[in-house]
Image (spheres, helix red, strand yellow):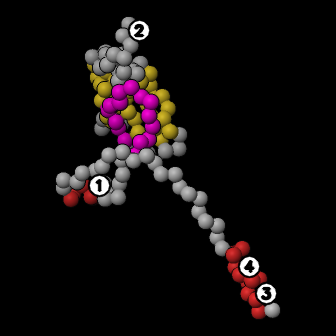
Amino acid sequence: MKLRCFLLVLAALAGCAPPAPPPTKQAETLGTIERLDAALDSIVPPTARIERLAQGFQFVEGPYYSRQGYLLFSDVQGNVIRKWTPQGGVVEFRRAAGYDGKDAPADAFIGPNGITIDPKGGLVICEHGNRRISRI
């Protein structure tokens, strides 16, 4: 009788236990962060890792991370600026972003190079193929 009561209590407790959390998929980690000055810890946590957010681009440059939570970066050979968000991944932001012509050879380094935001909030783009700096 005592064994039967014990088993009933054990079964009841097992049914009340919270479910185990699902296993989390670890993001692919690349390289290491070398800390040459302890001041880096004030802006990059010691536990920070370098993670791959996306792939399949030709030659990326000019990253700009917004405090609103998105990342803009250029694919120089693809002649496109892309936008990454944690919710939506990578989407095309602007095509023909560094060269307006149609005569560029395949894989030419003619697209957007550097990207930043000016003090008034405008997007500033170094247009490699057009040989100019533009603001939108």
How far apart are the alpha carbons under marks 4 and 3? 12 Å
Q: Residue at coordinates 64% horizontally, 67% vertically from top-left?
A: 19
Q: Nearer the viewer, mark 4 or mark 3?
A: 3
Circle 1 residue: 43
Viewer-proximal residue among 82 and 57:
57
Element at badge 4? helix
Viewer-proximal residue among 76 and 115:
76
Circle 2 residue: 102
Crowd rating for badge 4 (residues with CA inside 10 Å; few <14, some 14–19, many 20+):
few
**Magenta extent:** 51-65
Circle 4 residue: 12
Q: Residue at coordinates 69% horizontally, 75% vertically from top-left?
A: 14
How far apart are the alpha carbons under marks 3 and 1? 59 Å
Q: Is residue 56 above or below residue 32?
A: above
> In this figure, what is the number of numbered marks?
4
Q: Residue at coordinates 30% horizontally, 29% vertically from top-left?
A: 114
Are discs 3 and 1 less than 8 Å apart at CB?
Answer: no
